[in-house]
Image: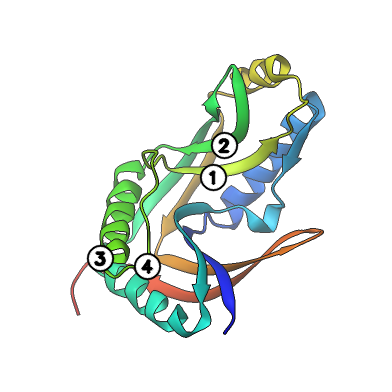
Amino acid sequence: MARLRTFLALNPGDASRDRLAALQEKLADATAGVQWVETENLHLTLLFLGDVDDRDLMKVCRAADRAAQDHAPFVMSLEGVGCFPNMRRPRTIWAGVGTGAAEVRNLFQDLATSFETQGLYRPEDRPFSPHVTLGRVNKDADAESISRELAKHDKWRGGETTIQEVLVYSSDLTPKGPVYTVLGRGKLRGKKD
């Protein structure tokens, strides 16, 4: 029986993805020691499910669709940059969510509750914070220079996109980086079927 690394995510849209890539280029020119996420892999993770048995993948896709259908499509903007865990110790560089943040949090909560009830998800210890990961900071990078550069872009705006679906992805880790494949889609309908 095969197992696939699986997660649920939102697609930021092509225009926002292009702006995210341009931001990555600006940050990369001024910082060193960051492994940047490939442009085609930029997304907003809702739930990381880990390794899922292939026999459970249809169940995962159906659960995502059921949980998503109660939510109406909404506009989401990407804005601001920051890092986890904090500016003194940057480990993950991200772009934040402005407009639509409440809708993303509500969608996350409904998905997390549904998937946890079905035994498909184990909640994380940290609170959910809507973001798109831009890069991961190497241990030997100059944290101070990265923090200074991020502060210069705190007013960054990445545009808006209409979120109409939750995507179920598999993640195949390769030596050249992860390869994501869409396994299913949960349409935002705003009503129960």
| Marks 2 and 1 in Cβ contact (< 8 Å) | yes
Evaluate if marks 1 and 3 touch, with contact meaning CB atoms under 8 Å apart: no
Q: CA distance from mark 2 to mark 1?
A: 5 Å
Which residue is outermost to the left?
A: 192
Q: Is residue 128 left or right of residue 80?
A: left
Q: Which mark is residue 120?
A: 4
Residue at (75%, 19%) from the top-left corner? 142
Residue wearing tag 2? 94
Give whichever of discs 2 and 3 has the lower sequence position: 2
Q: Is residue 109 above or below residue 92?
A: below
**CB contact under 8 Å: marks 2 and 4:** no
The mark nearer the N terminus, 1 or 3, is 3
* Frontmost residue, 80 versus 67: 67
Residue 95 placement (x, y as % from top left): 54, 37
Disc 3 element: helix
Q: Is residue 69 left or right of residue 166?
A: left
